[in-house]
Image: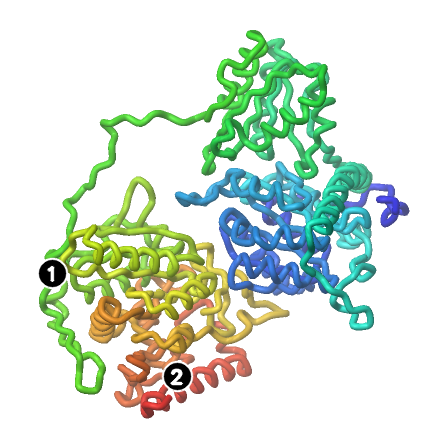
Amino acid sequence: MAVSENTEAQAVPAEQVTCFESGNEMAATAAAQINYHIMGYFPITPSTEVAQYLDQMKARGQHDIQLIAADGEHGSAGICYGAAMAGARVINATSSQGFLYMLEQLPTQSGTRFPMVLNLVTRAVSGPLDIRGDHSDLYYGLNTGWVILTASTPQAVYDMNIMALRIAEHAEVRLPVIVAYDGFFTSHQKRKVQYFKENEAVQNFVGQNPNHNYPNVSDPAHPVTIGAHMGGDDLLNNHYQLSLALDKAGEVYAEVAREYAALSGREHQVLDLYRMDDAEVAVFLLNSAGESAKDTVDALRAKGIKAGLVRPNIIRPFPAEQLRQALKNVKALLVGERADSYGAKGGNLTHEIRSALQVDPDNQTIILSRIFGLGGKDFYADDAEAFFQLAMDAAAKGYAEIPFDYHGYYPGDPKNALAPVSEPLYGEAYKSGLIEVTPGEDGRLKVKLPPLRQLTAKPHRLAPGHGACPGCGALSALELFFKGIEGDMVVLFQTGCAYVVTASYPYSSHNQTFVHNLFQNGAATLAGMVDAFYELKRRGEIQISDDVTFVMVSGDGGMDIGMGATVGAALRNHKMIILEYDNEGYMNTGSQLSYSTPVGHMTSTSGVGKTQKGKKGHHKDTAQILAACNIPYVFTGAESNPQDLLQKAAKAQWYANNVGTAYGKLLCACPLNWKTPDHSGHDLVKAAVDSCFFPLYEIEQGLTSITYNPELKGKRIPAVDWLKGMGKTKHLLKDEELLHSFETEIERRWSRLKLKHESTLL
C-alpha cells in the first residue's frame, strides 16, 4: 500500500493559524484535532498538562476523546493497550518514573502489533528525584520495539503527533509510536507555532481509522486470541517480524514527512543536518539542545571553522545509513547525551553511532562522548562551544585524548561538606511521659492525654523552613499527629507535596530519620525496612533498647497508585503506621483528580463546562478498604478535632509497635487547589466533619466506633455549608441533580457507619 494513499488528493498546503504555545499545548491540540477515541492517563510532571489541556477542551466540547484516569502509569498503559486491542485510536502522555512504571506493558503492545501514540515528555529518572528534563527515561524505551520520534520544538511536537499516527497505522508498520520532547525546555516554554485551522485537514491527512481491518476484540463474529505464549522458534520469528516492521517505519517516516511538508510547508527529515555539507567537525545532539547549538555553529562558521550540527528526528529505527552519509567527511564528532549508560563509557547513542560507522571501512570519524544536562541543567552557547572545541582538538591531534567524560560536573571541596544546623533530637527528647495507653476490659485501648498545651513542649518533628503553600493543611495535621507519637520515629514519605516541600537538597526539614520513595512503592519499602530492623535487633546486631515507630506518609493521590503495595503490606501485617493525608487530588502535580476526589468536584482534569460537570463517580473510601484487610487498627482524623487525633495517634503507635499495621486517613485542606482563602483550612475541614462527609471514627480489632458524632452534639450541618466555602464546588450548588447525588452518598455512608457503630457483627 502506498504511503500517500490517504492524501493523494490533497497536495496543496492547508490553511494554518499562527499562535504562541508550548509543546504540551501543541500535543493536546494535535490529539484533539485527530479526535482519538481513548486516552488512559496518570498525572506526572511535566507531561500532566497534556491531559489537563485535553480535559479543558473536552469541557468546551472541542473533541470526543474519552479521558480515563488510571490508578497509576502501569494502569494507564493497560487502558491504552486494551483500547488499542479494541480497534480504537489511542493517545497517552507520561514522563520519567511514570514511563518506567509502564515499561513492562510497552513490549507487550509492540510485540502484538497494536498501534498508538505516546507523548514522552522527557524527565530525569530517580534517584534521587529530580522533576526537570533529561533523557534518562527515553533511553529505557530504546529496546521496547516502539518507533521513537524526537521533537525539538513545540512546532515539531504538533507536527510529529500528527505524523506519528500515520506511521503507527501504516499497513507494513502497525507499531506504537513515541513522540519524545524535552521536559520544561519544550513542554512548557512557549514559541511561535502554526496549526491547521480546520480539523478536517488533520483528519484527512491521518485518514480513516484502519484498525477495524485488523484483528481486534470488537468483532464477535471473528474471535481472536491475543497474546498466546510462544516457544523459542515462534518468538524468534515474532521478534524478527517486529524488527522488519521497525526498519520499514524508517522508510515510512521519510515518506510521511515529505507528504506532511506538502500539506504544512514544514519537513522534518530523518536527520536535521545544520551546515553539514562541508563540515569537518560536528556535534550530535537530541531535541532542544540541538536547537540551542545552531547559533554556536553560525558563530564558528563566521570564524572560518567548518562546524556543523546533526540532530535526529527519529532514533527508532536508528538512522544508521543517513548518519554514515552525513559523517563521511567529518574528522571528529562529539556526541552529547542527556543520559548515561552507566559503566559503558558512553551513552547509548554514542555506541550506536560508533557501530553505524564501524561498517563503513572508509569512515575515519573520531567519536567523542560527553554526558551533559542531567536533571535539567541548562545547556548554553558556552557549553556548545566547549563541545566543538573538544571535537576540534581531536581532529587536530588525530585522536580523542579523553573519549568519554561528563560535562559540567565539579569536584567536591571538604570545606563545603554539609553539616546539621541543629543537634540531633532522639530518644528521651520525644518522650513526654504524659500519654498513657492501656488495654481496656473490652480489648480496646484506653488513652489518657494531658492538656494539649503540655504537649507543645515536645520538639517538632518538622523543623521550620519548609516550603509549603500558605494555609497548607497537610504539614500542620502531620505535626499534630506526630505529637501523639512518643519516642523515636522513622518516617517514609511517598512522592507528594509533603515530601517535596520538606526535603529539597541540600536542605531537610526533618529532625528525625526521613526516607523518600516513589508513589507506588512506599508501603513495600517501609515493610522491608521495619522487618529488617526487628530482625537485626533480634540477632543483636543493633543495640536499641526501645522500639522505633515506623510511619509511612502518603497523600496527593498516593493511595491510588500506591494501593497495591499498601494492601499487600496490610495483609502481611507489618509493624508500622500507614498515614494518608487526603487533600482530595493530585495536588503535587497541579490538582488533577484522584480517586479520593468527591463526585462533581472540579480539578484540572475534571473540568466544568457545557459537556461535563466535574469528577464522575464518588470518592474512594480507603479506610474501609484497609479495614477489610483485617489489620488491628484503622482510623480517620482531622486537625479540627485535635484531642481525637492525638488519641488515635497514640493508639496507632501502640498497635504498630506491639501488634501490626495501623492505618489512618487525615482530611487536609489545600487552599490553592480548593480555591479558598489561605486562612480558611481549619474551618473547611471542620465543616466537612460536621456535615458527615468526613466522619471521625476508628475500627479497633474489627470493632467500629464513631469517635465524634455531630448529630448527637447538635452540630451537624448540611453538605452545602461545606461546599459553598470552596471555589472548586460552587457549580454544585446550582446543579440540583448532582448535589442530590452527593448528599445521598454522604447519608448512605454515614448511615452504614452508624449501624457498624451499634453492632459488633458489622
In which quadrant is the C terminus drawn?
bottom left
- Judged left or right of residue 455, residue 508 is right
> In the rendered structure, which amino acid carries the disc numbered 2?
Pro
Disc 1 crowd, CA 10 A, few/some/many (<14, 14-19, 20+): few
Residue 46 percent coordinates (x, y): 51, 48
| Residue at disc 1, secondary structure | loop
Position of residue 230 relative to residue 408, above or below, is below
Residue located 41% across and 80% down the image: 719
Count of residue discs: 2
Of the two numbered discs 2 and 1 in the rendering, the one whose residue sits closer to the viewer: 1
Position of residue 699 relative to residue 613, above or below, is below
The disc at residue 718 is 2
Q: Looking at the picture, tell me which residue is in the foreground, 25 or 213.
A: 213
Q: Looking at the picture, tell me which residue is in the foreground, 87 or 388.
A: 87
Identify the mark nearer the N-term, 2 or 1. Answer: 1
Quadrant of the rendered structure where residue 468 is? bottom left
To which residue does mark 1 refer?
457
Residue located 64% across and 49% down the image: 27
